[in-house]
Each structure stands twice: as C-alpha cells, then as structure tokens.
Image (tube, rainbow, N blue to C red):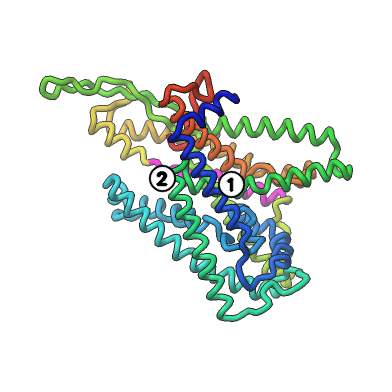
Amino acid sequence: MFDKIQSIFRIPELRRKILFTVALLVVYRIGSYVPVPGIDSQALMQAIDQARNTLLGLYDMFAGGALSRATIFALGIMPYISASIIMQLLTAVIPHFEKLQKEGEEGRKKITQYTRYGTVFLALIQGYGISIFLENIEATGFVTTSAIVPNPGLAFRLLTIITLTSGTVFLMWLGEQISDRGIGNGISLIIFTGIIARYPGDIRNTFSAVRNQELSFFKLVFLGMLMVLIIAGVVVMTQAMRKIPVQYAKRVIGRRIYGGQSTHIPLRVNTAGVIPIIFAQAILMFPSSIGTFFGKFEFMNTFSEYMNPSQPLYNILYAIIIIFFAYFYTAIVFNPRDLADNMQKYGGFIPGIRPGKRTADYIDRVLTRVTLPGALFLAFIAILPSVFIHKFHAPFVFGGTGLLIVVGVALDTLQQIESHLIMRHYEGFLKKGKLRGRNR
C-alpha cells in the first residue's frame, strides 16, 4: 500500500492535481471559521444544537458545521445542489431544456450557466430567510443565553444576504476549479470534506463516553464491528449493477465493416444515489421545524413529538418516502424509451428481445426490479442514525446521507486516481477487479 501511495506522487500531473485539490479544500475549511459580522456565534450554536432534528440541523451537516458557527460559508453548497436537482427535473418535463441536454457540450454549458443563475437566486432567498430567522430566533422557542443578533435591522439583513450569497458563489467556483484542475467532482469533495470534519469531534465524544463509563467497552467494540459491516454493505450496494448484454450488428460502409461488437447496459442498483434520502429528510423534517418554531402551541408540540426520529411512525414514513423517491428519481434520470431508440438507430439489440418498444419495456421491467433492493437498502441506511442514538445510545451519528456521500465520493476519487495510475502503467489499488465510479 505504501508503494502505491508513493506511485501517486511519482506522476507529476497526478501530484499537481492532488496538491491543488488539497489546497482548495484547505481554503474551504479556513473559510468555514470566518464569522459573519453582527452575530453572536455562541448563542447561535446553542440554538442550532436544539434544532438538530430539523431542517436547520440537516443544512448544518451539509455545510460542515458552518451554519452553527455563523460563518461566510453558512449556506454551504446546498443552493447549488438544489439548483442542480431543479434543473434535472426541468429537463425531464420542459422540451427546451431536454433539447439543450441533447445538443452535446454546448447544450450542457448552457444548462450549467442556468444552474449558476439558479444558485445565486436560491442563495439570495435563503440568505434573506436566514437573516430574518436569526433576528427573530428568540420568538421561535429556542433558549439562548444572549441575543444572537445584537443589532438587528436592514443593515444586518443586507450584509448577511451579500455575505452568505458571496460565500456560496465562491464555494461553487472552488468546486468547478477542483473538477477542472483537480481530482474528482469538486462539489462532492466539498460536501465530503464538510461531513468528515465532524468525525474528530465524534471520536473525541466516543472516547469521553467510554472514559466516563457512559458507554461500555464491549458495546464500543460491537458498534465498531457493526460499522465496518455496514460500510462494506454500502460499498457493495454503491458499486452493484445489473448488466444487460447488447449486441451490435455488422454494417458494411464502403470497404469497411463497422459494428459487430458485444457490450452491455449497466443498470445500477442505486441509480438515484442520496437524492431520495435528501428529499425524504426535507419533507419529514419540515413538520419538526414548524413544531420547533411554533412550540408555544400545544397541538404543534404533540405533532412534533410524533414526528421525532425516535418514534416508529417517523421511521415508517421515512422508509416509505425514500422508496417512493428512489423510483421517482430513477424514472426522471433514466429513460428506457430513449435508450431503446438510440440502440435501434445504431443497430444494437438485446439478444432474444425485439428492438423498439419491446426493448424499452424489457429495460424498464429489469430496472424496476433492480431498483427495489437499492431502495430498501437506502431506507435501512437512512434509519441507522436513529437506531444508533436511541437504541444503542451511541454518542455519535452513523449512517444516513453522510455515510452514503462519504463512501460514494471516496470511491469516485479512488477511481480517478486508479485511472491515472493504470494509464501511466503503474499498478492500481486493486490487483483483481476494478473500482467503478458511481457515474460509470
């Protein structure tokens, strides 16, 4: 393993990409500690800690804790992710965007530009919402030792909106620079860095719990072994795919023969990735957020208790919504009809299946069956945090969106490095088999 790591730095191009990526991620982490003017950070941390199971807690996780520290990157990269998801959905329902997607590189550039505009628009709205929320946070039921915004008003709102929007745009630029000149998907790496930045604190809390006899040593060992097995399962499900064989007929054009080769269509078990969990969390955490903000009403308190992650009703609804969105998002991003038409256009066919509608129906049927285990596994991973905290009384959060993102981004990055090593005739990380990125 040490020889393979040394091989990485023997390739000048790969070494530059890795060092460039690390440098920009360090800039991101430094910015995560630069505070927004006019906010009492200590009071805000107390409020966010009380909102851990609401939308604010979810947002803070994606921002790497920047929201609870009231820094310039408090919005994180979430506006860009939201804009990207919206553009994907619009591409499936609006003919203009669907046409742009089929235009190749130029069309993708226009879609990327629209995504950037959408990111700025969403960041402005969310920045305004956060500034209003911070000014009135004491009225929503949160208990703090001092006022979060000592000097509220129009000046504070404008300053907060400009600062947070600028921070999001700068993060978007960092992500694009990493994608173009570094290793892997820059946006994913930024989210990955923000999530793993919490791990040292979780490890410290775990050892403190063992030292204070709040967590037994045997339970710690059991949890450690369980975590290893779960991570292995996530790796397997992330890489798993169903290969449908495709044969291309031979064509004679002039004096040359084209086609005749065999290939396959890779249908991923988890085509939707972490999107179903994000959608489900946003939907289920909304009632909890409303209950937290309007806790002075008795019926809101009762409703919020039923929608707590420790309650069976919450977990059942959570699993059902995740399974629904796994199928919904897969249907949005994967069109069997278009795939069947393109195969027929270039002389491709699935052995034993007629081209055209029969091929599209066959692919759709296989995709429906393959998506089911992926959706069930997503629901299982999503419920893990509540199991670890409420059943095992673990002093850390394990599972859910964070685990899927960390494992997926790590596999993608290793696959990028593996490709560079093999291209330069170095031995890859694996002697047998091959790492597959999520987008391949």
Specify the principal SS of the magenta part.
helix
Tell me if residue 348 is in the magenta stretch: no
* Tag 2 residue: 180
Q: Which of 73 and 284 is in front in this view?
A: 73
Indicate left or right for 245 with 2 as reference.
left
Residue 193 on image: x %, y %: 59, 47
Tell me if residue 314 is in the magenta stretch: yes
Q: In which quarter of the image is the C terminus?
A: top left
- Note whether 344 is above or below 120 in the view shown: above
Is disc 2 surrounded by few (<14), some (14 to 19) or many (20+) residues within 10 Å? few
Q: Residue 289 carries which label?
A: none
Q: Which of 410 and 216 is in front in this view?
A: 410
* Tag 1 residue: 193
> Helix, strand or loop at disc 1?
helix
Q: Give the range drawn in magenta.
A: 311-334
Could you tell me if residue 370 is visible in this image?
A: no
Residue 349 on image: x %, y %: 29, 26
Q: Residue at x 63, y 79 (%)?
A: 152
